[in-house]
Amino acid sequence: MSQTRATVLALERDLYRCQWCLYKRDRVRDVLQYTVGDVLGGGHHIMGRARVDLPEAIIGLCSACHSLATKNVIKQRDLIQLQKERLGIDLAEQYPQFVNWK
């Protein structure tokens, strides 16, 4: 799937680094170079691409973390919290209709 302009802006903001690895696992992984498993690294739409395609709702993830986020092992609520800590943006407040608290 091609990247949207918002995804490119989010990846540039994140310096093409996996933000989950950087902030939660204390390691640096490039989202485009570190690839394993069934999902490519890149920009992950926290609220869903069809719902909110804006840079603040997209986070850079390596393929391993992207796969875990897609499978809901890394929870949406945790990605929302990370964006709030990193960027000061409360996605749950801005887009409550798209939040899955499970």
Image (tube, rainbow, N blue to C red):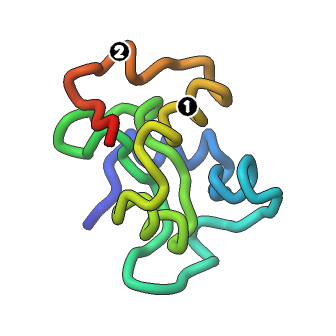
Residue 67 rendering spot, x and y as whole percentages: 43, 70
Local secondary structure at mark 2: helix
Q: Residues within 10 Å of mark 2 (few under 14, many from 20)?
A: few
Q: Is residue 71 above or below residue 49?
A: below
Residue 34 rendering spot, x and y as whole percentages: 62, 78
Q: Residue at x 64, y 45 (%)?
A: 14
Q: Residue at x 36, y 32 (%)?
A: 54
Residue 78 rendering spot, x and y as whole percentages: 52, 41
Q: Residue at x 26, y 44 (%)?
A: 48
Q: CA distance from mark 1 to mark 2?
A: 13 Å
Quadrant housing the C terminus: top left
> In front: mark 1 or mark 2?
1
Q: Residues within 10 Å of mark 1 (few under 14, many from 20)?
A: some
Q: Residue furthest right?
A: 26
Q: Nearer the viewer, residue 8 or 86?
A: 86
Local secondary structure at mark 1: helix
Q: Residue furthest front?
A: 102
Q: Residue at x 38, y 42 (%)?
A: 46
Residue type marked 1: Gln
Mark on residue 81?
1
Q: Is residue 35 left or right of residue 39?
A: right
Query: Looking at the image, how many numbered discs can be counted on the residues?
Result: 2
Say which label, 1 or 2, has the lower sequence index: 1
Q: Is residue 101 left or right of residue 9?
A: left
Q: Is residue 32 above or below residue 69?
A: below
Residue type marked 2: Gln
Mark on residue 66?
none
Q: Which residue has dot 2 on it?
A: 94
Q: Is residue 25 above or below residue 52?
A: below
Residue 26 rendering spot, x and y as whole percentages: 82, 57
